[in-house]
Image (cartoon, rainbow, N blue to C red):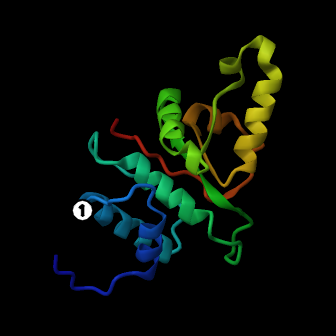
Amino acid sequence: MHVNKKENPRLRQLLSLFPHEHVRPIQRAALDVVATMFESGNRFSILEAPTGSGKSALAFTAARYAGTLDDSEDFDCEPGAYILTPYNNLAAAMTSDFGDQGLVALKGRRHYGPKTACNYEDAKADFFGSVEGVTSYAYFLRARHAPKRQVPNLPPAIAG
């Protein structure tokens, strides 16, 4: 593939953080856009891509990259990212795929049951203590106590 522009050094770093052995061409193109986003100082992104294109891996890669950033900008933020999904089952699927690489999921208190309040508190502490976390939009919008992150949200599954 011929590329007319110089490769963004952030793209190389993003590619090194990709959670799978191989990056598909559409994923590389998306990561190039993410690299440009970070280069321009944009802290928010929405990725809309078809089912099966690998949005979750892209969101996790961007979250991992955000975990390498420090607070040297004008923002009072912790390193890392919150990945937001419309449904808890997508968060569970991402945790199944990337939990062994550090991704932590959090659901609302009611999903942990009345006899498992300490499980919820432990899950909440793990989530807010992690660099890369995934939760639903509904939970995040109610979570006024969430620490600010370098990249507050990276939705992986807008288009399913």
Q: Nearer the viewer, residue 62 or 74?
A: 62
Indicate the secondary structure of the residue bearing disc 1.
helix
What count of labels does the image hold?
1
* Residue depicted at x 67% and y 76%: 73
**Between 96 and 152, the one nearer to me in the picture:** 96
In percent of width and height, residue 101 lies at: 57, 51
Residue occupied by mark 1: 25
Answer above or below: position of 153 versus 151: above
Indicate left or right for 51 with 39 as reference: left
Q: Is residue 122 left or right of residue 138?
A: right
Q: Quadrant of residue 32?
A: bottom left
> Is 8 located above or below residue 102 in the figure?
below
Furthest toward the left, the residue is 1
Q: Nearer the viewer, residue 71 or 27?
A: 27
Q: Position of residue 29 (x, y in %)?
A: 29, 65
- Horizontal placement of 110 versus 47: left or right? right
Which quadrant, please, contains the C terminus?
top left
Q: Residue at x 79, y 33 (%)?
A: 122
Residue 75, position in %: x, y?
Answer: 69, 69
Residue 37 seen: no
Do we see residue 25 in this rendering? yes
| Quadrant, the N terminus | bottom left
Please state the horizontal and vertical placement of residue 62, each as a whole percent of the image.
49, 60
- The residue that appears at 53% across and 32% down in the rendered structure is 92
Q: Is residue 110 above or below residue 6?
A: above
Amino acid residing under circle 1: Pro
Mark 1 neighbour density, 10 Å: few (under 14) some (14–19) many (20 or more): few
- Which residue shows up at 58% across the image and 64% down it? 66
Is 54 located above or below residue 63 in the figure?
above
